[in-house]
Amino acid sequence: MHKVNDPASARWEGVLVRFPAPSRDVKKSYKLGVIGGDGIGPEVTEVALHVLDACERRFRFRTERTSFPWSGAHFLKTGERLTPDKLAPIRAQDAVLLGAIGHPDVPRGMIERDVVIGLRRGLDLYVNLRPVILYDDRLSPLRTKGSAEIHMTVIRENTEDVYAATGERTAIGTPAETATVPMRFTRPGVERILRYAFELASRSERKHLTLVDKANAITVQEIWREVFEELGSQYPSVQRDAMYVDAAAMWMVLKPEQFDVIVTTNLFGDILSDLGAALAGGLGTAASGNIHPGRVSVFEPIHGSAPKYAGKGVASPIAAIGALAMLLEHLGEVDAAHAIDSAIRNGLRTGRIKGVEAGLQRTEQVGDVIEQTIGG
């Protein structure tokens, strides 16, 4: 880890860490961790930090930024991995901006389990919050659906389910080979994510919450239905319904306008949130928050490290900048978060931002459009 405390620029592991000049009228300061990661991660993160500079100037707050090296590239260089005993400096942050994790030369899934799942478990980030935002109707893959119909939030439980254990394989290589992993849910784990979902739905304009499970075929998921009904009586303003995951996937495509807030299991949330991203124009638009209310939380684009585009400067930073907006809202800088959202929408709708696919526009050019709009 390398910490920078002066207002100059510093480049570390491919991530530009910059501090705007101090201002006498700065109202607040936040400790921000930065994990650029692999592939396009450092590039899109660098652009997001430029946008953060613009927000700091306009909205009069400051961040003290600390870069952390955890990535596949760092492992290949040093052999060092992120283990639970190394989380203390990350816990000391107010929030963390994560670029992307994954390297083709590292054993499949190892770094993702170390960093992505390691942060979620180690920091108890039990909420995975994934807004589905269609910034511009031309990005919709659905012929008759636009931003009036596609606007929902997927809340994915982030610490339990089949992700909570490594499982085992027995009799490998024989006809009797078997692979098993438990689908584990606890009442406290189910209750806290459902309560979070009810609270969010109670503040939404439509006040509607949909539980997605597969309780008809996976009987242990009946715990979700039971706790959902128990908590529902405490939120009389929230209209609620429940849906099986296969039906939910179908209706997200056929009738997305029926959804407001969706809450679901870790496994199903992983799948449905990517479907939601596709409805909003692809993974290049989508950001997520790994959240524990009141504690350090981690915000990231949901796209991968896309190594084939690394170093070319052609990856879209929209998702990373959207993750920054979520991070700022989490910190209470709501006006700055809204300014970023507005700048992204304006850039896409005016054509100054050509789209979200890699290669349509230089990465830094997209960032410049957003930064200039925020700067006024």
Image (tube, rainbow, N blue to C red):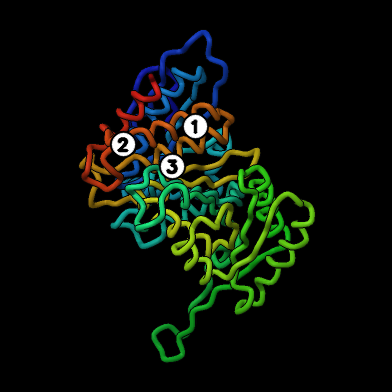
Q: Give the labeled residue for mark 3.
A: 98
Q: Secondary structure at mark 1?
A: helix
Tell me if mark 2 has few (under 14), some (14-19) or many (20+) residues whose alpha carbon lies within 10 angstroms of its own.
some
Q: Are marks 2 and 3 in contact (CB under 8 Å)?
A: no
| Above or below for 331 versus 372 | below
Specify whether residue 367 is in view. yes
From the image, state whether disc 2 or disc 3 is nearer to you.
Answer: 3
Measuring from the top left, give residue 85's x and y in whole percent.
Answer: 56, 46
Q: Residue at x 35, y 58 (%)?
A: 143
Q: Secondary structure at mark 2?
A: loop
| Above or below for 351 versus 116 | above
- Residue 317 numbered tag: none
| Number of disc labels | 3
Q: Are marks 2 and 1 in contact (CB under 8 Å)?
A: no
From the image, state whether disc 1 or disc 3 is nearer to you.
Answer: 1
Instruction: State how far apart marks 2 and 1 are (Cα).
Output: 25 Å
Measuring from the top left, give residue 200's x and y in whole percent.
Answer: 64, 46
Q: Residue at x 60, y 61 (%)?
A: 160
Instruction: State how far apart marks 1 and 3 are (Cα).
Output: 17 Å
Q: Give the labeled residue for mark 2.
A: 14
Which amino acid is tagged 1? Ala
Which amino acid is tagged 3? Leu
- Residue 337 numbered tag: 1
Tell me if mark 1 has few (under 14), some (14-19) or many (20+) residues whose alpha carbon lies within 10 angstroms of its own.
many
User: In the rendered view of the protein, which quadrant contains the C terminus?
Assistant: top left
State which tag comes first along the sequence, 2 or 1.
2
Query: Image quarter for residue 184?
Result: bottom right
Tell me if mark 3 has few (under 14), some (14-19) or many (20+) residues whose alpha carbon lies within 10 angstroms of its own.
many
Measuring from the top left, give residue 148's x and y in whole percent.
Answer: 46, 48
Q: Residue at x 54, y 43 (%)?
A: 87
